[in-house]
Image (cartoon, rainbow, N blue to C red):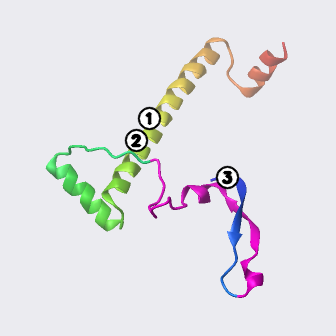
């Protein structure tokens, strides 16, 4: 993530009383999302979903998980993120094409043409 950090108390290692003093440490914000809740489980905002996959696709996903030493859930998450990036890239290219065509129709063929138009 970014270089954002939060201040939080931390106990020094056990031992003599002077080591029991609370110290102020700087930790990244993501650290606080990894803190265990009261029963020791990792706190997350994950939502469990049951999905159905064709047998061949399920086998391929499981093989990828084994090969990459990941959980099946992580493989599905990676695939969805890749699909999202691909869609966004396609939308960007579509918008870029639209505005390129509009610029050409307005006679803007270079950066110099654009600067000239913006100075008006």
Along the line of sight, the residue nearer the viewer: 3 or 22:
22
Assess whether mark 1 and mark 2 are in contact (beta carbons under 8 angstroms): yes
What separation in Å lies between label 1 and label 3 (alpha carbons)?
25 Å
Residue furthest out toward the bottom: 16
Q: Secondary structure at mark 1?
A: helix
Along the line of sight, the residue nearer the viewer: 99 or 38:
38
Mark 1 surroundings: few (<14), some (14-19) or many (≥20) residues within 10 A:
few
The residue that mark 1 highlights is 87
Residue 27 left/right relative to 75: right
The residue that mark 2 highlights is 83
Asked where in the image residue 15 lies, by quadrant, the reply is: bottom right
Assess whether mark 3 and mark 2 are in contact (beta carbons under 8 angstroms): no
Q: Nearer the viewer, mark 1 or mark 3?
A: 3
The residue that mark 3 highlights is 2
Along the line of sight, the residue nearer the viewer: 62 or 111:
62
Asked where in the image residue 83 lies, by quadrant, the reply is: top left
Mark 1 or mark 3: which comes first in sequence? 3
Does the magenta run of residues contain 21? yes
**Residue at point 38%, 56% (across, down):** 74
Magenta segment boundaries in residue numbering: 16-45
Along the line of sight, the residue nearer the viewer: 73 or 86:
73
Q: Secondary structure at mark 3?
A: loop
The count of marks equals 3
**Residue at point 35%, 67% (across, down):** 69
Q: Nearer the viewer, mark 2 or mark 3?
A: 3
Mark 3 surroundings: few (<14), some (14-19) or many (≥20) residues within 10 A:
few
Mark 2 surroundings: few (<14), some (14-19) or many (≥20) residues within 10 A:
few
**Residue at point 51%, 30% (across, down):** 93
What separation in Å lies between label 2 and label 1 (alpha carbons)?
6 Å
Q: Quadrant of the C terminus?
A: top right
Coordinates of residue 76 in the picture (x, y in percent):
34, 50
Asked where in the image residue 87 lies, by quadrant, the reply is: top left
């Amino acid at each position: 993530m970014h270089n954002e950090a939060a201040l939080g108390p931390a106990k020094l290692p056990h031992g003599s009383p002077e080591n029991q003093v609370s110290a102020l440490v700087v930790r990244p914000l993501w650290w606080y999302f990894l803190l265990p809740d009261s029963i020791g489980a990792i706190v997350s905002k994950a939502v469990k979903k049951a999905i159905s996959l064709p047998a061949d696709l399920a086998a391929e996903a499981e093989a990828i998980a084994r090969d990459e030493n990941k959980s099946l859930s992580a493989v599905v998450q990676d695939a969805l993120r890749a699909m999202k990036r691909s869609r966004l890239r396609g939308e960007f290219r579509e918008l870029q094409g639209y505005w390129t065509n509009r610029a050409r129709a307005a006679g803007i063929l270079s950066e110099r043409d654009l600067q000239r138009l913006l100075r008006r």
